[in-house]
């Protein structure tokens, strides 16, 4: 399942983030890449001081992890601190799947769900689409500033070459309480029906049955 979530970051937060990024130092992105990714990765990553990084993370993560749609889609157990990536003209990130285990020793987590938050507007650069291979073919994603795409980390994906301007994104990974993407999608859909029923028909027999099924299916499938 691939879902897009509009306006995770409001204008004020975006302005602050972009001001910070415009003054910050970026370094070669291959320094943080695994062996396979090194061959296809050509971008830059933020190398900010701890205080700047903390401020950025508070804004981006604070908005993301509290967003109901993100919580429903990712069902996150752990959410990692994001990377901030910059692609200028000629930069790209070729086909790859994200590393299965992220984080430093003692703080490791499994990447089940990948999230990209777009930080600048699509008309500020040409190219730079996030292209994700799904069972229904390739999806090309290029969203407005402050919006996010959430997709299974097991999906093959790449970032198309930026041919003009600069693309800025925050990228993060979550370990989900529901490891299997197909099960996660079923729970996401069932929960939509459940929430609608609880709101509109709280006293009906069917509402109670759907609610019980959802909760117990969640219990059956979850792992912490
Ligand atoms: Ni990736």
Image (tube, rainbow, N blue to C red):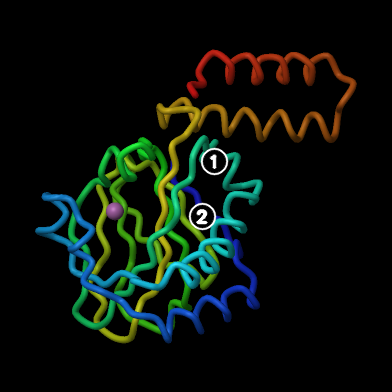
| Residue for point 33% across, 61% down | 130
Query: Circle 1 is placed at which residue position?
Result: 73
Q: In front here: 204 or 121?
A: 121
Q: Eyeballing the image, is 36 above or below 105? A: below
Query: Circle 2 is placed at which residue position?
Result: 4
Which quadrant of the structure image shows residue 213? top right
Q: Position of residue 214 (x, y in %)?
A: 64, 20
Q: Eyeballing the image, is 153 above or below 167? A: above
Which quadrant of the structure image shows residue 1? top left
Is 7 on the left-hand or right-hand side of 150?
A: right
| Residue for point 49% across, 49% down | 3
Q: Position of residue 196 (x, y in %)?
A: 76, 35
The numbered mark, 2 or 1, whose residue comes first in the sequence reads: 2
Give the structural element (helix, strand or loop) at label 1. Answer: helix
What distance separates the C-alpha of mark 2 from that of mark 1? 10 Å
Q: In front here: 19 or 190?
A: 19
The crowding category of the residue bearing disc 1, from other C-alpha atoms within 10 Å (few below 14, some 14 to 19, many at least 20), is many
Ligand 1 within 8 Å, label 2 CB:
no
Give the structural element (helix, strand or loop) at label 2. Answer: strand
Is 44 on the left-hand or right-hand side of 4?
A: left
| Residue for point 44% across, 48% down | 80
Q: Eyeballing the image, is 172 above or below 216? A: below
The crowding category of the residue bearing disc 2, from other C-alpha atoms within 10 Å (few below 14, some 14 to 19, many at least 20), is some
Q: Position of residue 34 (x, y in %)?
A: 17, 50
Q: Position of residue 206 (x, y in %)?
A: 78, 17
Which quadrant of the structure image shows residue 181? top left
Instruction: Name the front one of labels 2 and 1.
Output: 1
Is 193 on the left-hand or right-hand side of 54?
A: right
């Amino acid at each position: 399942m691939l879902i897009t979530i509009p306006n995770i970051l409001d204008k004020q937060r975006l302005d602050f983030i972009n001001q910070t990024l415009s003054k910050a130092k970026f370094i070669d992105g291959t320094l943080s890449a695994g062996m396979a990714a090194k061959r296809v990765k050509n971008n830059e990553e933020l190398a900010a001081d701890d205080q700047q990084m903390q401020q950025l993370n508070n804004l981006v993560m604070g908005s993301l992890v509290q967003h109901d749609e993100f919580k429903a889609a990712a069902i996150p157990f752990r959410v990692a601190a994001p990377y901030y990536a910059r692609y200028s003209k000629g930069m790209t990130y070729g086909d790859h799947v994200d590393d299965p285990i992220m984080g430093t020793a003692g703080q490791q987590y499994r990447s089940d769900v990948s999230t990209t938050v777009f930080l600048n507007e699509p008309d500020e650069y040409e190219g730079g689409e996030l292209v994700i291979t799904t069972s229904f073919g390739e999806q090309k994603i290029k969203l407005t500033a402050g919006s996010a795409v959430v997709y299974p980390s097991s999906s093959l994906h790449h970032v198309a070459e930026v041919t003009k301007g600069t693309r800025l994104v925050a990228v993060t990974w979550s370990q989900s309480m529901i490891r299997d993407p197909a099960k996660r999608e079923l729970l996401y859909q069932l929960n939509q029906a459940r929430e609608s029923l609880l709101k509109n028909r709280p006293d009906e027999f069917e509402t109670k049955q759907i609610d019980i099924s959802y909760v117990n299916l969640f219990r059956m499938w979850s792992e912490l």
